[in-house]
Image (cartoon, rainbow, N blue to C red):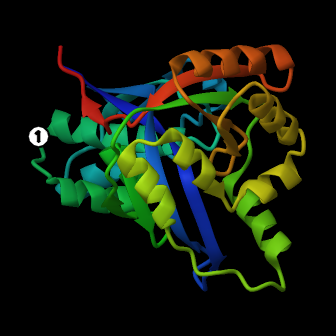
Amino acid sequence: MSVTVRVPAKVNVQLAVGAARPDGFHGLANVFLAVGLYDEVTVTPADALRVTCSGPDAAQVPLDRTNLAARAALALAERYGIAPDVHIHIAKDIPVAGGMAGGSADGAAALLACDALWSTGAGQDELLAICAELGSDVPFSLLGGAALGVGRGELLTPVEVGGTFHWVFAVADGGLSTPAVYGEFDRLTAGTEVPEPAASPALLDALRKGDAAALADTLSNDLQAAALSLRPSLAGTLEAGTAAGALAALVSGSGPTTAFLAADEESARKVADALAASGTCRSTRVAVSPAPGATVQRP
């Protein structure tokens, strides 16, 4: 018997970052939108815990117990007194180390898959609590759709979305370390008054109305300057996508993937083609949002 869970990537349509807290984390107002790029995580009973991975950039994915999928299995097993003897296979399609929460998605997927495999009967609140222990983005990967995350981003309130949004993602060569990007944010904002993070009412209204043009006017990412400081070449990617007709462009999360909002499916294809031809990125992906969260796949 095995259980497979499909889990989406995310884009941050707003990432408002506060000053570093005493615990080292930053307060956030993080508006997540799940997008239709998916990893699939399959768990199967085994003699011992092990992780394998296939797909684009699979060689970059750690296969030891630092992998969030392995940590999720261990956390659930410990809570219920179960031996964590499973083979976890991750079929990657979400860009690795790209600011789209691929690792967090795998953690949420493994948690849900192990919960189903072991029939623990854990409720959603309990699973979300475990997710929050694993990482700031993991709870949203479990829920999907759209949500406002505060605290470290793990305290979620669902957000209403009134339509479909079309996106193009430009995948860069290599990754960016999230701690390094936050460190650069701290360096760039040192000596300045960093505002308390808060969700944009105009952005939430644009999501509720399904208004792509209004959403384009309100997209923001407080980590973008830090990501561009560490990877200046991303500026060329952003410019190429905007020149190709994207309504708006921004770095996705901590990067280095860049996200482009398009007016419709045809416009998204044109932007993707132009970016692919520009030489400013390694590959492009087209996807729509919102997307469902981690979901057990039925045979």
**Quadrant of the frame with the N terminus:** top left
Count of numbered badges drawn on the protein: 1
Residue 256 pos. (x, y %):
73, 41
**In the rendered image of this protein, does residue 24 appear above or below residue 199?**
below
Q: Nearer the viewer, residue 39 or 193?
A: 193
**Quadrant of the frame with the C terminus:** top left
Label 1: how many Cα within 10 Å (few below 14, some 14–19, many 20+): few
Examine the rendering and report whether any part of residue 133 can be seen: no
Q: Is residue 42 left or right of residue 118?
A: right
Q: What amino acid type is highlighted by mark number 1?
A: Ser
What residue is disc 1 on? 119
Residue 223 pos. (x, y %):
71, 59
Q: Is residue 234 left or right of residue 299?
A: right
Q: Is residue 175 left or right of residue 280?
A: left
Residue at 70% over, 45% down: 251
Examine the rendering and report whether any part of residue 262 can be seen: yes
**In the rendered image of this protein, does residue 35 appear above or below residue 101?**
above
Residue at 80% over, 29% down: 243
